[in-house]
Image (cartoon, rainbow, N blue to C red):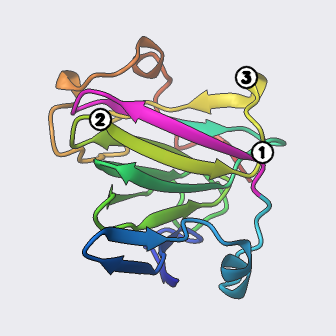
Amino acid sequence: MDVTLSSLSGLLILKPKRFADARGYFCETYNKRRLADAGITTDFVQDNLSVSRPRGTLRGLHFQREPLAQIKLVSVIKGTALDVIVDLRRASPTFGQHFSIVLSEEDGNQVLIPAGFAHGFLTLEPDTVLSYKVSNSYSPEHDAGIRFDDPLLGIDWGCDPALTITSDRDRQLPPFDPTARYFA
């Protein structure tokens, strides 16, 4: 497995090894020992699957507050998505900055998102399926988010966000507040 640092402190890009032949490929999408060999010792407790039928579905930017903040291991198992991560750790040198990466079934990249980040994605193909492991179970009381189209964040989604398919909940999330203490 290849592990690459991103421009955001602590955010990692993982590339599991694929074994391909004329039939297709085989890939370990998660291997606790291999991750530990790469210095990643997260105990994942829940697997999530997100299916987005139409192209242009935008979900996010979501996070879970302390004490149940989540580390996420995100991959696309079908289709393609623009994955966006925002650093909300107040003490981080990259606080308020974002990182974008295209994840696809074809490329097989994964993103390891530490606790303290908001996460969202835009589907670039119909019937895109994201799989992600999380380090804490979902807690409605700790569920939070920020606006995906906040001008302070300046995220380039590659399209007009007004034309995306987004939930009412996501459109009503609060804007990013640079004075907030989302995470220490």
Which dot, 2 or 3, sits closer to the camera? 2
In-image side of 17 versus 58 (left or right)? right
Q: Residues within 10 Å of mark 1 (few under 14, many from 20)?
A: some
Disc with the residue nearer the chain's start (2 vs 3): 2
Is residue 121 visible to us here?
yes
Q: Amino acid at mark 2?
A: Asp
Q: Is residue 152 above or below residue 36?
A: above
- Rendered location of residue 165, percent (x, y): 28, 22
Disc number for residue 136: 1
Residue 43 belongs to magenta span: no
Mark 2: which secondary structure?
Answer: loop
Point out the residue furthest to the front here: 23
Where is residue 7? Give x, y as percent. Answer: 43, 73
Picture residue at 76% right of the left edge, 65% below the top: 42
Labels 1, 2: front one? 2
Which numbered circle lies on residue 140?
3
- Residue 99, how many percent across, how many down? 39, 60
User: Which amino acid type is marked by label 3?
Assistant: Pro
The stretch of residues the image draws in magenta is 44-61
**Residue at mark 2:** 127
Residue 117, visible in the rendered structure:
no
**Residue 60 bears which disc, if any?**
none
Mark 2 to mark 3 CA distance (whole Å): 27 Å
User: Residue at the location (44% across, 57% down)?
Assistant: 97
Type of the residue with mark 1: Asn
